[in-house]
Image (tube, rainbow, N blue to C red):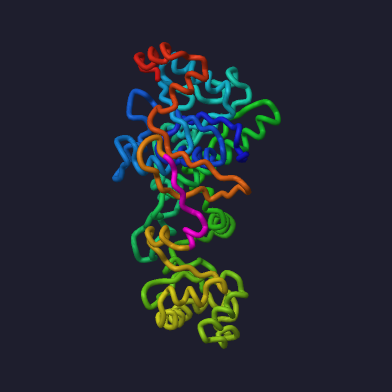
Amino acid sequence: MLPLDGMKVVAVEQYGAGPFGTMLLADLGADVIKIENPLDAGDVGRQVGPFYFSEGDSHFYQAFNRNKRSMTLNLKHPEGRRIFHALVQEADAVLDNLRGDLPEKLGITYEALKDVNPKIVCAHLSAYGRDGPRKTWPGYDYLMQAEAGYLRLTGEPNGPPARMGLSIVDMMAGLMAAFGLASGVIGARARGVGMDVDTSLFDTALHNQTYLATWYLNGGYVQGRETRSAHPSLTPSQLYKTKDGWIFLMCNKEKFWPILAAKLGRPEWAEDPRFNSFENRLTHRDLLTELLDGILSEQTTEAWMERLGGSIPASPVYDVAQALDSSFVRDRGNLASFTRDEGAPVEMLASPLRISGQDLPTRAAPTLGSDTAELLGGLGFDAERIAELRRDGVV
């Protein structure tokens, strides 16, 4: 048994953030029914290039939609809404990642569905929230990084503002939505009453300022960018040059500094008054960076990792290919093969969660509407009626 076996989620979703959240639920055993519009090409993520397995089956789409079922359904059609309600009757939750004003218009809020299923949990992931002056605004990850301060924290101090290389806000907000949904279901099962659970890209992005926000709100300190991706208050905790590239060292506890000094052949640095405390090292960070560069540049990153790894926190600086091809990733089982409905398997990252004694499901993302007939059959529709629904543009 997987942790979420028996949980059913109806997902009105597209693109990245919402699908990422429901994929995390599906990996753990939830039955996620992905609702896609039959009048267009379904989830817009299916068309996001530049790489495709086939038409409507992009690599991007596969990365966010494994272990789900796909049902085409026109929520604006009266019969489509009736079918949606039939799904909701049997579901624990509905998740959407629509523009903030659309859940109410489409009738997928708790207020609209409570008479269908009093226990239903409606999780909403919008750009800027479902209330306030921006509820009708569209929005995307990079915009949130810009407005929530990320771009002014990333990159070199003298360079232009820089976003993170990944759509990190999408993933964080998807995880937050999944967490809110699962929490809501626990509460609804205990009390017999469902609810709306809301989060947004912007709220999640801002919330992740955590300690930097506390520094400003209580001390008026505005953190900016640091040279070489350095920690703002601890050192050595940044990038350093090696003979063939870079290494990232993080002596974020005092105990690591004398170990590093000894490993570098400079044990006297442990007691040097310039370097013998967090405060003193920070005061002399430029000098310390110069000294560490000088020693670390004598050998390759790999050689230093062999010497330092496991003794102090250290990491090589890889590109995407190097990261995925590393022996550590293979040994950890971080990659997995997922079976498509047709064609070659999809090689993807495995779930970061491990469940003792259980293998997680490995079905690749579904083709558009691949589960429509089966789901309708489960609701009591026969083949003739399903054909009529297809002709009428309902499914």
Which residue is depicted at the point 33% across and 29% down? Answer: 41
Which residue is depicted at the point 35% across and 39% down? Answer: 343
Most distant residue in the right direction = 190
Which residue is depicted at the point 48% across and 80% down? Answer: 288
Check the image and report above or below for 35 versus 334: above
Corner quadrant of residue 244? bottom left
Residue 312 image point, x, y percent:
56, 73
Residue 205 image point, x, y percent:
48, 47
Corner quadrant of residue 53? top left
Of 112 and 3, the residue lying toward us: 3
Q: Quadrant of the C terminus?
A: top left
Of 343 and 19, the residue lying toward us: 343
Residue 154 image point, x, y percent:
42, 59
Tell whether 28 sits left or right of 149.
right
Residue 337 on the magenta span: yes
Of 5 and 298, the residue lying toward us: 5
Q: Which residues are magenta?
A: 328-339
Most distant residue in the front direction = 343
Most distant residue in the bottom direction = 268
Check the image and report above or below for 273 versus 303: below
